[in-house]
Image (cartoon, helix red, strand yellow):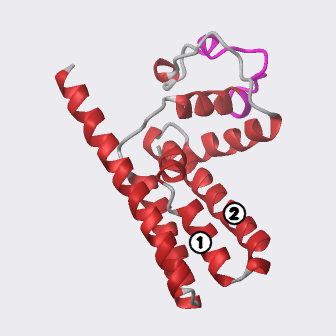
Amino acid sequence: VAGHTVAAIAWTILVAALLALMIIVTRFVAVAGSSTTLGLVVGWGALFQLAGLVTPVMLSPDVYSYIVYGRIHGLYGGNAYRDVPAGFTADPFLAMVYWDQVPSFYGPLWTVISSGLAAAGGDHLGLTVVLFRLISALGVVAAAGALWLLTRSLGLTTAAQSMVLWLWNPLTIIEAGM
């Protein structure tokens, strides 16, 4: 318990420091407001996403469910909306799925994507997790592109600030990568 308390305190301090950094950079961008500043904001935001690809930390085991549902659909030819993971006892990732008696409740597009990622990763758990994290990071970058398109008419400074608030937000970084 004491170790968890120390870890929780350290985690809280880290997230608070990252939030403070995000606020400071947002204020700096308001003053600097140049295309070079925008490039730095986006570049560092992309690096934050890349860091999430290789971190050993996982805050949720949900990715294992995504993998197994993808394997049910793509590898075993089952129906992820009817067949439960527990029915595939030989699957090497089954032990990592918490909700093994529950069929998938994710949409069909995500099931197809999960099938492709699970097939690409094969029986290599680390590779498969990284592939899922990569898709998540690409989603964050795509959302940043949409945010840019929506805010650029408000001026370079506002667009750059929106990029900081999205790409540098610790909650975005944590959720996408862990």
Task: Please state which amino acid type lies under the numbered disc 1.
Answer: Gln
Q: Disc 2 marks which residue?
A: 142
The chief SS type of the magenta part is loop
Over which residues does the magenta segment extend?
A: 73-88
**Quadrant into which the N terminus falls:** top left
Q: Is residue 118 above or below residue 89?
A: below
Q: Residue at x 60, y 11 (%)?
A: 86
- Residue 78 located within the stretch drawn in magenta: yes
Q: Is residue 163 above or below residue 12?
A: below
Q: Residue at x 68, y 26 (%)?
A: 72
The image quadrant that residue 66 belongs to is top right
- Residue 17 located within the stretch drawn in magenta: no
Q: Residue at x 58, y 14 (%)?
A: 100
The secondary element bearing badge 2 is classed as: helix
Q: Disc 1 marks which residue?
A: 161
| Disc number placed over residue 85 in the picture, else none | none
Residue 103 picture location, percent across and down: 71, 17
